Amino acid sequence: DADVTQTPRNRITKTGKRIMLECSQTKGHDRMYWYRQDPGLGLQLIYYSFDVKDINKGEISDGYSVSRQAQAKFSLSLESAIPNQTALYFCATSDSVRQGGEQFFGPGTRLTVL
Amino acid sequence: GEDVEQSLFLSVREGDSSVINCTYTDSSSTYLYWYKQEPGAGLQLLTYIFSNMDMKQDQRLTVLLNKKDKHLSLRIADTQTGDSAIYFCAESINDYKLSFGAGTTVTVRA
């Protein structure tokens, strides 16, 4: 079984709809992240969480919210989706980046907002 | 990814060596990383190098780091069709954040 799973894998929705993307991990890591990937722009950090009670905004948090329901679960919500939120979204987990700790990525969710 | 720059495309013949280059801006970065993304999949860590090293070799992969020029490269020897993917360079900005480049799409042709 995959260590980091994301649901759904693909989603097409309409402008103004509320969308939730879910992430679960079996790595036992405290740190979890949400990124979006746009062609030619690499990965941009949306939100990150050090533990269940510690949630922080990343570079591009506007229009997004998150919930850390448990150590293993971190969900990303788009309260009112807009077309420029069409992107590939990745969840990741890690122990600590500074000590050379690897970030483990989920397979991604492809979101299209019409 | 504006702090980390890499070329967007590389085409290489099967069996040749591939070299992917990256420049970064944060001189305090402790670790620098290479991630690989295959079609339809997430990113997987290929290798990383600690900032006090100038070279790291792991089987077909060689990472070279020039701290003075803030230049990182990844060489893949004997490139195979399975090496076709997007390769991301990343630097550790602080204890939690990685800054990624835009990714280099490597295409291996027969």
Image (tube, coloured by chain):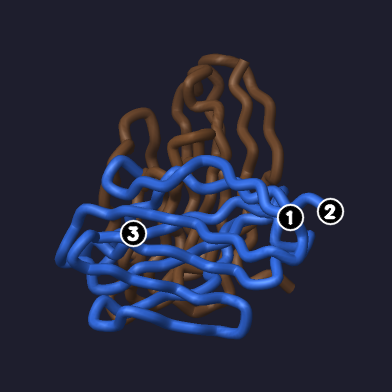
Q: Quadrant of residue B42?
A: bottom right
Marked residue nearer the N-terminal end (1 or 2): 1
Helix, strand or loop for disc 2: loop
Is residue B38 at all visible to an observer of this figure? yes
Judge depth for marks 2 and 3 and give the one in front.
Answer: 2
Chain that is brown in the image: A
Q: Amino acid at mark 2?
A: Ala
Q: Residue at x 29, y 64 (%)?
A: B92
Residue A65 appears at what percent x and percent y?
38, 39
Q: Quadrant of the N terminus of chain B?
A: top left
Alpha carbons under labels 2 and 3: distance apart:
35 Å
Alpha carbons under labels 1 and 2: distance apart:
6 Å
Q: Residue at x 55, y 21 (%)?
A: A17
Looking at the image, residue A7 sits to the left or right of residue B26; the answer is right
Task: Identify the residue under disc 1.
Answer: B13
Chain that is blue in the image: B
- Measured along the vertical axis of the image, is residue A23 above or below residue A86? below
Looking at the image, residue A11 sits to the left or right of residue A55; the answer is right
Q: Quadrant of residue B98?
A: bottom left
Q: Are marks 1 and 2 in contact (CB under 8 Å)?
A: yes
Task: Identify the residue under disc 2.
Answer: B110
Q: Amino acid at mark 3?
A: Leu
User: Closest to the observer: B106 or A81?
Assistant: B106
The chain under label 2 reads B
Is residue A53 at all visible to an observer of this figure? no
Q: Are marks 3 and 1 in contact (CB under 8 Å)?
A: no
Label annotation for residue B98: 3
Judge depth for marks 3 and 1 and give the one in front.
Answer: 1
Residue B29 appears at what percent x and percent y?
22, 67
Q: Amino acid at mark 1?
A: Arg
User: Closest to the observer: B95 or B77?
Assistant: B77
- Measured along the vertical axis of the image, is residue A18 above or below residue B64? above
